[in-house]
Amino acid sequence: DIPAEYGGAGGDFRHEAVVYEETQRRGLSGFGQGVHSICAHYILNHGTKDQKQRFLPRMARGELVGAIAMTEPGAGSDLQGVRTTAVRDGNHYVVSGSKTYITNGQSADLIVVVAKTDPTQGSKGISLILVEGDRAGFKRGRNLDKIGQNSADTSELFFEDVRVPITNCLGEEGKGFAYLMNQLPQERLQIAIAGQAGAQRAFDEAVKFTKERKAFKQTVFDFQNTRFTLGALKAKLQAGWAHLDWCMARHLKGELTAAEASAAKLFHTELQWEVCDAALQLHGGAGYMNEYPIARLWRDARVQRIYGGTSEIMKEVVARSI
């Protein structure tokens, strides 16, 4: 959905949603396209014309991979607690600090770094700094060993006095926290879409397995417990797809609020976990074997309730709007 003038296809968020849905249906939950897209939209929404022309066409073609560096060893959900700094030195910033749990960390060519340009100003002292992957002083740490989403290169990143020009500040200095908050509805909607699609794939796997597997001279699907379990899940999935359409319609009109997006992220990722866990149970012992797709779907689903804002944070955001 990047405009054609910057090398994109010129679509809208619905076209992006199709990609999120289909990659999840294929079990590609570690595919970092969502984060790549988030980075592109930060540049599209807040970048200068020069920044857009330099980066967006290559990002649209997949020649330049994006990552966003928010989380630190000592700062997760509370972004105001970041300790990475970007100190002015003439016409450059000197970026120093470390980040962790960064999706696309090993493959990224461009990193949107959340840094303090004025540590005395709290959230008003946060800026977004563009750091190219070939800058001196930038180092990639471990490709982290995770429970699931093993196809994702989730990494540590280190910035050791990395010098970048002042023109690499994304938008206005000190407005980084506001930009992050403005972008959150789309980011959380993306995760909600992935959650719903992942839930649907797990459900489909359960239906397929239970209709093929036999026990006590009948298929597992023919047992009332199986049918009741799948029937209840199907009803929730039906409501979930309708809810996503409502969310996307509001988002396209610029009306999806932070609380609504947080509620969507909460609902759909929790539904994903419920469906994946129930689907694994219906597989019996086979569900615990990596040769069956449900094992991977179950593992990969767990982090959905954590990244992009934990379910607990989502409840707090929703509660504040009541």
Image (cartoon, rainbow, N blue to C red):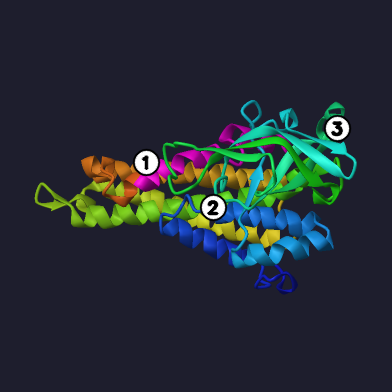
The three-letter amino acid code for the residue at tag 1 is Asp
Q: Nearer the viewer, residue 319 or 8?
A: 8
Q: Secondary structure at mark 2?
A: loop
Instruction: List the residue tagged with mark 2.
Output: 32
Q: Earlier in the sequence, mark 1 or mark 2?
A: 2
Instruction: List the residue tagged with mark 3.
Output: 118
Q: Residue at x 25, y 45 (%)?
A: 283
Residue 148 is inside the magenta segment: no
Residue 32 x, y percent position in the rendering: 54, 52
Q: Secondary structure at mark 1?
A: helix
- Farthest residue toward the front? 136
The three-letter amino acid code for the residue at tag 2 is Gly
Q: In the image, which residues are magenta? A: 296-322
Q: Residue at x 38, y 43 (%)?
A: 298
Alpha-carbon span between mark 1 and mark 3:
45 Å
Residue 300 x, y percent position in the rendering: 43, 44
Instruction: List the residue tagged with mark 1.
Output: 277
Q: Is residue 83 above or below residue 134?
A: above
Residue 302 is inside the magenta segment: yes
Q: Residue at x 77, y 65 (%)?
A: 53
Q: Earlier in the sequence, mark 3 or mark 2?
A: 2
Q: Is residue 19 visible?
A: yes
